[in-house]
Image: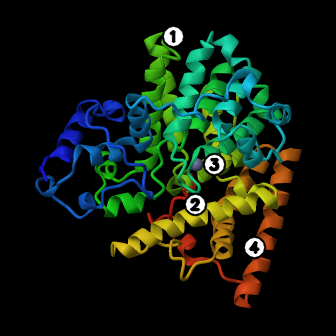
Amino acid sequence: MKRILISFQLVKCINRNQLAYVRVRSRAGFETERRGSHPYIDFRIFHSNSEIEVSVSARNVRRLLSFQRYLRSSRFFRGITVPNSSNILDDDYNGQAKCMLEKVGNWNFDIFLFDRLTNGNSLVSLTFHLFNLHGLIEHFQLDTMKLRRFLVMVQEDYHSQNPYHNAVHAADVTQAMHCYLKEPKLSKSLTPWDVLLSLIAAATHDLDHPGVNQPFLIKTNHYLATLYKNTSVLENHHWRSAVGLLRESGLFAHMSLENRQLMESQIGDLILATDISQQNEYLSMFRSHLDRGDLCLENANHRHFILQMALKCADICNPCRTWELSKQWSEKVTEEFFHQGDIEKKYHLGVSPLCDRQTETIANIQIGFMTYLVEPLFGEWARFSNTRLSQTMLGHLGLNKASWKGVQREQSGSGDDVDPAFEEMDSDILPQEPRLS
Ligand SMILES: [Zn+2]
């Protein structure tokens, strides 16, 4: 096999222009193979510490960039159309989906049902609808074709094979964000610009997520970990991927360069806030503001801080949904953890905390997640916005935790286990769910 210094060249290329890499793809030699099991990572790269030892084919490099993008290009150049990717729009989605959109601001909105009704296009349909509902298309004079194209690209760059970090999770977070934007304190002070950034950040906050967490990328020497110096690796990648799509779509090409740059940087601030390993910092800042009572939403900086907190809430709000919805999310995220654990076992990488299907249970993971991450965050959010929605969320959180404790008691006979992995919150060991995002 031809040995090439692909990874080294790629990093050099990225350093020249960090945004360019998400667009890089070869147009030669498309393979007919279908996508295999996730994550789409070449393990030969992980076992190599030197670029000289790296032996990868161009196909594998494409896989590292964005398998979704490669697959789409591949289909395009082979003349294969993808029936599901563009039949969603306008009048095509059925009456039931339209009916659901009339209640898009309800906390019990069933995103799984909506995704089925839209034939797997929940993210495009929901976000387009919200842009319309908030008057963003008119206010920013957006070209609706470009908007649809942008949203389709976003949806397609999520990995549908990820049990959890896929476009349905992004749609769910976007719907939750919409619910928070409607809260009285926010709605009366937010500008169209704030709403625009919030919805884009929510829809793109996990873009091109590989289905494994940051520690996995670090220990396998993934180029993204090198690129982002082992810090908020995934979040940086999601942000840069979002910026790549924004530029490619030309959705805001009619705006000034200054505004586009401001938008890109503010979307970054929102997405980077979803790194759960930073939660303590955000939470103590939030707490201090609330203690002092000095949050002033006429101040743009304060508004953006609140939007960061809102996106953090939206990202980990699964335990605050009804049991029926919450339970499904719990199962999906655990499946993704355990899949990572299976790969780690297979390649002798050391199984990450919460990822071992032999020793972990959904109930233990969920109780730890709720106790150490969700309850503290939503407790403060309810202090900031003490509304019916906040009380509803806390109510579901309490009930869901009690339900998992019941399951735990049945399984272990004790019921007091909290996963010790959550007690090491400041370390970098948490899997991605709690960095659920
Ligand atoms: Zn997320």
The answer to whether residue 241 is above or below residue 139 is: below
Q: Which residue in the structure is indicated by mark 4?
A: 404
Distance between mark 2 and mark 4 Cα atoms: 17 Å
- Of the image marks 3 and 1, the number of the one nearer the N terminus: 1
Looking at the rendered structure, the kind of residue marked 2 is Pro
Looking at the rendered structure, the kind of residue marked 4 is Trp
- Of the image marks 2 and 4, the number of the one nearer the N terminus: 4
Tell me what residue is drawn at x 74 percent, y 30 percent.
Answer: 93
Looking at the rendered structure, the kind of residue marked 1 is Met
Which element type, helix, strand or loop, lies under badge 4? helix
Q: Please state if 232 lies on the left or on the right of 42 as rendered.
A: right
Q: Which residue in the structure is indicated by mark 2?
A: 434
Q: Which residue in the structure is indicated by mark 1?
A: 255
Q: Please state if 40 lies on the left or on the right of 52 as rendered.
A: right
> Depth check: 26 or 277 in front?
26
Which element type, helix, strand or loop, lies under badge 1? loop
Distance between mark 1 and mark 4 Cα atoms: 49 Å
Ligand 1 within 8 angstroms of badge 3 C-beta: yes
The answer to whether residue 79 is above or below residue 362 is: above
- Of the image marks 3 and 2, the number of the one nearer the N terminus: 3
Q: Say whether marks 2 and 4 touch (CB < 8 Å).
A: no
Tell me what residue is drawn at x 67 percent, y 68 percent.
Answer: 366
Q: Position of residue 282 (x, y in %)?
A: 57, 49
Distance between mark 3 and mark 2 Cα atoms: 10 Å
- Of the image marks 1 and 2, the number of the one nearer the N terminus: 1
Q: Say whether marks 1 and 4 touch (CB < 8 Å).
A: no
Q: Residues within 10 Å of mark 4 (few under 14, many from 20)?
A: many
Q: Which residue in the structure is indicated by mark 3?
A: 315
Judged by depth in the image, the label closer to the viewer, 2 or 4, is 4
Label count reads 4
Q: Say whether marks 3 and 1 touch (CB < 8 Å).
A: no
